[in-house]
Image (cartoon, rainbow, N blue to C red):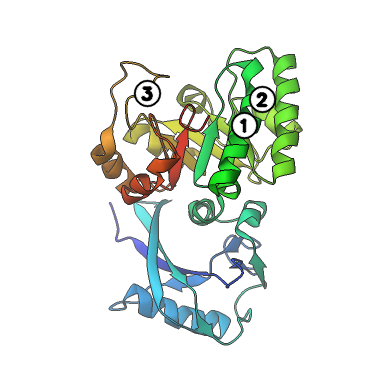
Amino acid sequence: MRQRPLVVVAGVLTRADGHCLLAQRPPGKREAGLYEFPGGKLRPGESLEAALARELDEELGIRIGPAQRWRCVRQPLGAGRVLHLHALRVASWQGEPQAHDHQCLRWVRPAELIRYPMPVADRPLAASLAFPRHYLITPAVVEAVLPGLRQSLARARAAGWLQDLAVCLRLPGVDRQRLHEVALAVRQLTRAEGIPAILHGDAELAEALDYEGLHSSAAQMRAVSGRPVSASRWWIASCHDRAELAQADALGADLATLSPVQPSLSHPGAPSLGWKRFAALARHANLPLLALGGLAPADLNTAQQHGAHGIAGIRGFW
């Protein structure tokens, strides 16, 4: 029998330098040792804002300024109960945060959040803070990858969003030795630029070459029973409907591409979602979504207005 949801608030405190606050759960508590965004349970009759102000006063000894409602993550707890984790962003407060109820506190750059083990419900929040909003997927032509990628990175630098970019190497059907060679060269190039690299389809190689993450197709996602890469790497799943989004969430993915939003040359004749359908799916998704299909960097604002974290593309970025 379904019970009332357990409603919890979490504060995403962000300093002027961009660092955000993580709190480590103390020994003796559930999920001890994991890092979370501080907060606690909503009391009867409380607003989200009032609950967060009370919890952060108790836990950190600070008085917060205005809190902006940001995201809600829903997680099944078993026995018919569901956790609703409401995250609110906080940019100003009085006092210096102290670990009254936690093992320790850490101020962390968003790009480093993936290194900290977190409860399941906190990971989508970390991905929303840390993962770039532009996601370039390479075309499946081995000879074009390196010269084309260099040109694409130069254009991104000139346009001002190179540091808000992640690159996905996708070369289906290429023999593994050749894939290893190209993947190593791409990893060296992205590391020199200081941007994350994601490898499509090969979890073992992604770990071996220290890629920041793995991207799995919908078919690859259906073939696994849990995360195919370690928790210290991003896992992105390709999704096309609500069922696949739910499966990606249940398996522990960090983000998902949702496609095709518009007709694209890579999938001619495939039915597209359109922005209205995309927005409807985004409203029910826990995971941050990267809109994919017939899009270019100029579509970022439109995508975000319809619930996307960012945009992904091949030809539109190449």
Q: Residue at x 49, y 38 (%)?
A: 251
Residue 90 vertical placement versus 197 (above, below): below
In the displayed structure, 187 sits above or below 73; it is above
Marking on residue 151: 1
Q: Secondary structure at mark 2?
A: helix
**Element assignment for label 3:** loop
C-alpha gap between disc 1 and disc 3: 22 Å
Which mark identifies residue 264? Answer: 3
Question: For residue 289, which numbered disc appears in the image?
Answer: none
Q: Quadrant of residue 279?
A: top left
Q: Badge 2 is on which residue?
A: 147
Hey, what amino acid is under mark 2?
Pro
Q: Mark 1–mark 2 contact, CB under 8 Å?
A: yes
Front-most of 73 and 41?
73
Viewer-nearest of labels 2 and 3?
2
Please name the amino acid that badge 3 sits on.
Answer: Ser
Task: Tell me the crowding category of disc 2: few under 14, some 14 to 19, or many 20 or more residues within 10 angstroms, Cα based.
Answer: few
Q: Is residue 106 above or below residue 189?
A: below
Q: What residue appears at the point 37 percent right and 76 percent down from the top-left corner?
A: 49
Callout 1 secondary element: helix
